[in-house]
């Protein structure tokens, strides 16, 4: 296994095993169970990649990655949060070099006929989202590696950084414990509305107790 692959495996065990700071946003009450990563294949514009990385950091991504691309940090002025210094970054050379944790589902974002519309997609609790380049599509090899293909319902392709932000927002909105919107126009009463209570877990159950 390549050195980067070995490091990835160790990282997944130590960091993701405890979920580290994954899924945290500015308000811990909005934290989402599980984790996610996001990356892009064959990206060519550093500014777009910098924007995507900054958004990933803001939405609580556990790590970021690129496939067959070089992240020229000095040119990515749009990443004002210096994301690679805050969360892990994996620069994979190709699809065969990708390594994901057990149970992590790869979600491709692409305008394909068989793709599921994003508003109808149920996000996996453990997911790695991958986008294609600015002037192209996901490679067939990468598409074959995806467990799901999702499309954003737009009239035409949008900026890769914008697409990534839309997907991450939809994940937080779908899986976060936000108050339901009211029937009338506008938001819930108060500044942010009532946050749903934290999930409660009962005590462990022993099968022998039911015998």
Image (tube, grey):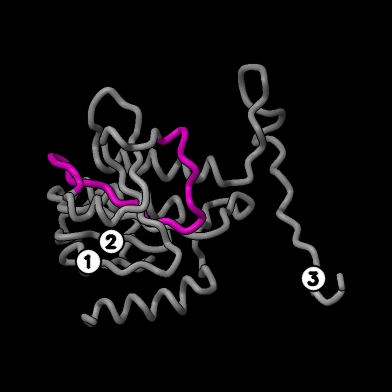
Left or right side of 203 for 54? left
Q: Nearest to the eye among marks 2 and 3: give it.
A: 3
Q: Which residue is mark 2?
A: 65
Residue position for label 3: 205
Which of disc 1 and disc 3 is earlier in sequence?
Answer: 1
Spatial distance from mark 3 to mark 1, Cα to Cα?
44 Å
Q: Is residue 99 above or below residue 108?
A: below
Labels 2 and 3: the sequence-earlier one: 2
Question: Looking at the rendering, in which quadrant would you find the C terminus?
Answer: bottom right
Query: Which residue is depicted at the point 22% across and 66% down?
Result: 91
Disc nearest the viewer among 3 and 1 = 3
* Residue at the (28%, 43%) spot, across then down: 161
Q: Which residue is mark 1?
A: 91
Residue for point 42% across, 74% down: 12
Is residue 7 shown above or below 154?
A: below
Q: Secondary structure at mark 1?
A: strand
User: Can residue 125 be found in the magenta stretch?
Assistant: yes
Circles 2, 1 touching at the beta carbon (< 8 Å): yes
- The residues bearing labels 2 and 1 have C-alpha atoms spaced at a distance of 6 Å
Left or right position of 202 against 130: right
Magenta residues (range): 118-138
**Does 31 sit left or right of 72 as displayed?**
right
Residue 130 screen position, x and y as percent: 30, 51
Mark 2 to mark 3 CA distance (whole Å): 40 Å
Viewer-proximal residue among 190 and 207: 207
């Amino acid at each position: 296994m390549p050195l980067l692959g070995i490091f990835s495996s160790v990282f997944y065990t130590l960091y993701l095993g405890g979920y580290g700071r994954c899924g945290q946003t500015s308000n811990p009450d909005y934290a989402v169970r599980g984790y996610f990563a996001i990356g892009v294949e064959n990206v060519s514009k550093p500014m777009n990649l910098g924007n995507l990385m900054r958004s990933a950091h803001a939405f609580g991504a556990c790590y970021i990655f690129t496939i067959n691309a070089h992240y020229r940090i000095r040119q990515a002025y749009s990443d004002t949060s210096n994301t690679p210094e805050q969360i892990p970054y994996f620069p994979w050379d190709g699809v065969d070099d990708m390594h994901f944790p057990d149970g992590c589902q790869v979600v491709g974002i692409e305008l394909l006929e068989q793709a599921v519309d994003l508003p109808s997609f149920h996000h996996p609790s453990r997911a790695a989202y991958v986008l294609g380049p600015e002037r192209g599509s996901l490679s067939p090899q990468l598409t074959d590696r995806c467990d799901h293909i999702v499309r954003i319902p737009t009239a035409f392709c949008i900026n890769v950084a914008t697409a990534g932000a839309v997907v991450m927002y939809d994940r937080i909105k779908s899986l976060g414990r936000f108050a339901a919107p009211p029937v009338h126009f506008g938001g819930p009463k108060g500044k942010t509305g009532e946050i749903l209570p934290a999930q409660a877990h009962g005590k462990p159950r022993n099968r022998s107790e039911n015998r």
